[in-house]
Image (tube, grey):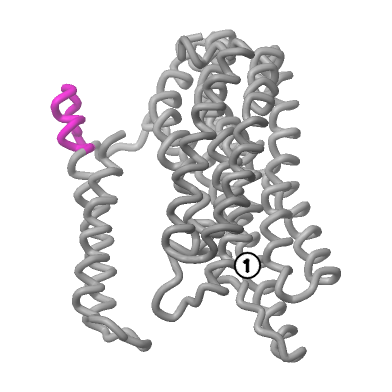
């Protein structure tokens, strides 16, 4: 689990070197030498991550011995699995293609109307990077531990253990992600201004990024639940069903993206596209959950849904307090570094205390014993 951290440290170091080499006030085009630095630095981070994993494998006693013959190697099954995963990847890329083209079309429409859209595909991509951060830190770390164990239980056809693994991971990750999703949604604008409002990105552009991020943040929990369900399918050795479900996701995403383009003003189209993208995961987890429930004899739904409902109720006082803090800073402090830093810091601290108190009153079991 720590290997990606090392990769991230290398990437951050390369980013710092790039900024140092470019210097202040640099403008496109980026020189070839600096592009090479970014590319080679990124590749070196991934290579170092692989090396760390290889050392860990060696210490565990694993020894790689290449074989010339392919009989009994499982290559045929791997190719069939990879084929469906390739389809899934292509469908994911098709969704990105749709988002990109609709965002660009909205920009063109805004220019024709004499309006500065400021919320194109670049804003969408930057918001998506921030949206992915809590999922990558929390859920992916748990998934890294979950998948091998769940695969072993699936191999033994121990469906009760598979259900337990899925439910436990969903509830533990949701305990953090539910309040965090609301916090990100409330403070998306000041966070985006802090992160991006410099250089060629104005405060207005960063505000647009924050609005997109706020919509995405509200879909953080459905997105995570859907990703967890995909890992259950992978543990079962099934990549075909996720690929078919991805068709439904793409259909919902496409329909809502087109609706946003036709009905919303150009400067709000990308926000609508982001909302449609998040809603597609609600559709996906509904379909995936129903299919998995039939295969596994249930998904511990009563326990998991009960925990999710209590977590959302426990977040209500934090949301009220967070909105109050945001109003106070907007009214009495105004825009500026103090407000952009102070509102999220005070709001999140107060919100965390209220959430923990409410979770204790509601007897959320993950508060006292993550092993439940």
Q: How many marks?
A: 1
Crowding at dot 1, Cα within 10 Å, few <14 / some 14-19 / many 20+, comes out as few
- Name the residue at 60% across, 41% down: 182
User: Is residue 285 placed above or below 25 in the rendered structure?
Assistant: above
- In the image, taking residue 248 as reference, residue 31 lies left or right, namely left
- In the image, taking residue 362 as reference, residue 49 lies left or right, namely left
Q: As rendered, which of 168 and 119 lies closer to the eye?
A: 119
Where is residue 306 drawn, in percent x and y? 69, 17
- Name the residue at 69% across, 62% down: 271
Q: Is residue 214 magenta?
A: no
The image quarter in which residue 16 lies: bottom left
- In the image, taking residue 279 as reference, residue 100 lies left or right, namely left
- Name the residue at 35% across, 37% down: 70
Q: Which residue is mark 1?
A: 97
Element on which disc 1 rests: helix
Give the residues drawn in magenta, as a range: 53-66
Where is residue 76 drawn, in percent x and y? 47, 38
Where is residue 207 drawn, in percent x and y? 57, 67
């Amino acid at each position: 689990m720590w290997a990606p951290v090392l990769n991230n440290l290398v990437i951050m170091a390369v980013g710092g070197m790039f900024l140092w080499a470019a210097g202040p006030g640099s403008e496109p085009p980026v020189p070839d030498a600096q592009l090479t630095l970014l590319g080679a630095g990124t590749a070196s981070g991934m290579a170092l991550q692989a090396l760390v994993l290889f050392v860990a494998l060696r210490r565990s006693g694993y020894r790689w011995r290449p074989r010339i013959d392919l009989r009994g190697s499982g290559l045929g099954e791997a190719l069939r699995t990879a084929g469906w995963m390739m389809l899934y990847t292509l469908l994911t890329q098709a969704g990105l293609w749709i988002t990109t083209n609709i965002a660009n079309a909205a920009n063109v429409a805004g220019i024709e109307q004499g309006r500065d859209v400021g919320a194109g595909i670049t804003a969408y991509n930057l918001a998506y990077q921030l949206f992915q951060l809590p999922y990558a830190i929390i859920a992916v770390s748990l998934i890294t531990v979950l998948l091998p164990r769940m695969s072993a239980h699936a191999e033994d056809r121990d469906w009760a253990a598979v259900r337990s693994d899925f439910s436990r991971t969903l509830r533990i990750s949701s305990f953090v992600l539910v309040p965090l999703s609301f916090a990100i949604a409330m403070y998306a604008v000041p966070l985006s201004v802090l992160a991006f409002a410099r250089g060629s990105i104005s405060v207005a552009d960063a505000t647009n990024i924050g609005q997109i991020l706020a919509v995405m943040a509200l879909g953080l929990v459905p997105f995570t639940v859907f990703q967890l369900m995909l890992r259950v399918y992978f543990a079962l050795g099934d990549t075909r069903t996720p690929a078919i479900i991805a068709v439904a996701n793409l259909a919902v995403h496409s329909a809502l993206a087109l609706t946003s383009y036709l009905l919303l003003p150009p400067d709000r189209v990308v926000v609508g596209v982001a909302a449609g993208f998040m809603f597609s995961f609600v559709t996906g987890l509904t379909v995936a959950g129903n299919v998995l429930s039939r295969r596994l004899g249930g998904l511990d739904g009563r326990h998991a849904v009960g925990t999710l409902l209590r977590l959302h109720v426990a977040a209500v006082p934090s949301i009220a307090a967070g909105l109050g803090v945001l109003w106070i800073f907007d009214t009495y402090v105004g825009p500026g570094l103090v407000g952009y830093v102070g509102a999220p810091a005070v709001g999140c601290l107060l919100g965390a205390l209220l959430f923990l108190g409410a979770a204790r009153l509601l007897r959320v079991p993950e508060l006292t014993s993550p092993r439940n």
